[in-house]
Amino acid sequence: MEKMYAIRCMMYGWLEKPISYITHHTLKIGLLILVASLSSCFSSKQLRSNEYILTSQTFRGNKTISDENLESLIPQKPNRRLLGLPITPQLWFYQIGQRKYDREAAIRELQAKTNEFEQQSQLLANQPNALKKLNRRYERKLKKLRVKAEEGNWAMRNMGDPPSYFAEKDAQANAAKMQKYIADKGFFNAQVGYKLDTLRRRQIRVNYLIAEHAGYYLRNVFYEIADPQLDTIVRKSLEDAKLQVGDRFDFENMTAERIRIETLLRDQGYYAFSRQYIRATDVDTVRRGTDRFQLGDTTDRKVDVVLQIANPPGRSSHPIYHIGDVEVRISPNGDTDVPDASTAGARVPGASRYDTLQRSGIRYLLGNRNISLSLLESKILFRPNQLYSQTNYRDTQRQLFLLNQFKFVNLNFIDTTNRQLRTLITASPLDKYDYTFEGGVFVLAQTRPGPFANVTFRARNLFGGFETFETTVRYGLEYQTGFDTDQSSKQAFYQSNEFGVISSLTFPQILFPGRGRFFFNRYNPRTQVSLSFNNTIRPDYKRSLLRSTMAYNWQTTPSKQFSFLIADINLINANFPDTPLGQAFYEQIRRQYEDEGSTVYLSFRKSLSSSFSFAYTYNTNVQGQNRRANFFRAAVESGGTTLNFFSSKTIDQWSDATGLQFYKFLRLSVDYRHYIPIRSRTTLAFRFNTGIVYGYGFGENSTAPYEKLFFAGGSNSIRGWLPRRLGPGSEVPQPTPGYPTVPTLSQRDGRKEQFAYTFEKPGDMLIEGSAELRGRLFRLGADINGALFVDAGNVWTIRNNPRRVGEQFQLDTFIPQIAVGTGVGLRIDFSFFVIRLDGGIKVWDPARRYQPKPDEPFVDERFMLREFSFRRLSTGKNPMIINFGIGYPF
């Protein structure tokens, strides 16, 4: 290991020198040498003469079938390599841990602890409370020892990968499995082989060689159905069939068609029907056998498919079922010891605990609870004498569960005489009252940690209509880099206190007059009314927000959600403390408003804004699943719409009388994300986010409320800039008074080359995009994931201001005004939440074409990547911006 130490010392010497382009490449080479020397510690002596480590599997020749689908067929997973090189650091860590691991000793320790637990359990057999404590104590110990015995010690489990040994019989089996899979996809003459490449230090790569050849396409699809009534139903639905003439043959489509027919018939009362009655004959085996294949022939071939639907043994048709008696039982523990239809008139234990009610043919046993039968009835889609429907069964169970009022919901059918299905629905309600407490430390970039606490109280079924009332009280203490009157002093942190209360009442239906509201019953409808108050107290200002909203929400499918915010009313009040800091801050933003037209000043005026909005969300991404997915959200909002019914003079009179500022605006935003799995734990994610807001008020009110404007920069935006400090356009962050192209420089901690980013920079228009490569590095108590990212975008104003330069969006100038940042990230994934740390630097800064002094010529420093220096991570001209967040940025 002396060689490793020498290399580390050499690298340290390189890092001490100024980084140039030559040194940059030398550094990368040195890093590779270091990793290679680490990997060389992998001992091949532990391998027998005929053993190899599998480090790579590739697929060559496949044009239609994706690598991802083929890789999922292979159970063997190769040891991970670094940057595609034959370097396996995780395997090295595993072997380091294995040197100090004795599996036999771990098994003996587990057995001894298990025997100890069993002996003590026998002694406490008659003491339930003591036995419960003993179980809890030993459960943790035994679980830890069991994991150690099965998976190895801490280093082996969390930092290493066990060796993946190559066996040629596995490659042969995998090739055969792939060939069958590709044939099932319609390439009947496909051929799959493999080629082995031996790499350094007993490592091997398996290259699977695939020749798909010509595909087979459906020429005819025949249905042979013995039951005439089924034949009529199926043929009417052939437009939705998964097998269509002209499509390439695919056994998955064959299976999907069987499932489609099964669902179709079960929705028509065929309760006992199953896909087992559907048989597919071999696909034109005679034609396939006589259709001689010749190497290199790429001509598409045709096949015929026949689907047969048989009758039940000994029957001439399939039976049709109807719904019989329907009974709903709501009890604390899902009790079944209650009266039922078969014991009518008899005294049954526990019957006195239940209220028995009848409505629309449904019998309700509510357990003396105040529950709206009309609402409960709207969630139950079964009625006596109705044809059985599998879709109604699923939707009923789903809607009852989504009420968020029950621990569990069960639906059972009992086949009685005359093909009548007695339906029993049992549910156990959640506690009427509960509360939760959450506390922690609030951390953001450019701040110091501060504590926060949330207390939430919840009441269910408050008025008997399955409503949920919820109140949350929040208090947080933060230390932020607020406004500073002395730019030459060391950066100061100010204490910020935030107190908030939000109360909401959620109804499991659309509250709207008329029968139109029942249209949404199948779509998990929600009406939410909320009232909130938030108060922020800082040394430089105080600001409070009183907000009231009413929204309709519904979900047509698990991936499609709609939201209609019919009222959003905000009352904002702000003032400045009578202190030197507060008055200096007020004077600064007022001067910026008068000299530059900055809208920050308007956000501190007492104002009233109201709006309504509509949003559509499509999301196929499932947390924890690495698969191709999309996210799309579009929202449109109109503010101050009712003010259009009044004259400008009337609105001015209201403003003068109340001291309130009113707004009228239109806002549109679109957010699109796309996720591509590269490997099982590696994902390439993209995001495009855009929006525009147009204020059409009067005079200085021709803008939108500050909260409705767009911002760029920060942990969920362009990560090479401080939060909400980028833009607008190519405008310098803080112009020198009277000179809009001369920036104010920071004077703190020797950072005289950096621009001062004192104030947030809002815009009327946003365009930004990101690309991020995410992958797992190792496990250390939680999954430690890494990321490489590139962000690009900016905000602009849509109105020209002669007192500002470069801030307006124009088609012929906006492209060089797009800022670009890049960086790396570290994510600690605990499965239930993710802690994220991103370091971003500037690549292209559109504001860096400026005048150093009023009488000096412009300098162009927009390409900022060359200004980044490891020696000056925080003090250089292009510092690294550290962004802390919870969850992924997109």
Image (cartoon, grey):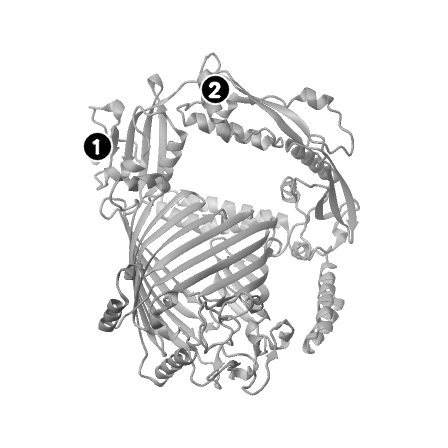
Exactly how many numbered labels are in the figure? 2
The residue nearer to you, when weighing 496 against 432, is 496
Q: Picture coordinates of residue 73 (x, y %)? A: 64, 39
Furthest toward the bottom, the residue is: 855
Left of 96 or right of it: where is 729? left
From the viewer's side, name the closer residue of 852 and 487.
852
Q: Secondary structure at mark 1?
A: strand
The residue that appears at 36% across and 71% down in the rendered structure is: 603
For mark 1, what is the residue?
A: 356
Q: Looking at the picture, does residue 24 appear above or below residue 321?
A: below
> The N terminus is located in which quarter?
bottom right
* Label disc, if present, on residue 231 of the rendered structure: 2
Of labels 1 and 2, earlier in sequence is: 2
- Tell me whether circle 1 and circle 2 mark residues in contact (CB < 8 Å): no
> Quadrant location of residue 27?
bottom right
Residue 438 image label: none
Amino acid type of the residue that numbered disc 2 sits on in the rendered structure: Asp
Query: What secondary structure is marked by label 2?
Result: helix
| Mark 1 crowd level (few <14, some 14–19, many ≥20, 10 Å Cα) | some
Q: Position of residue 274 (x, y in %)?
A: 48, 24
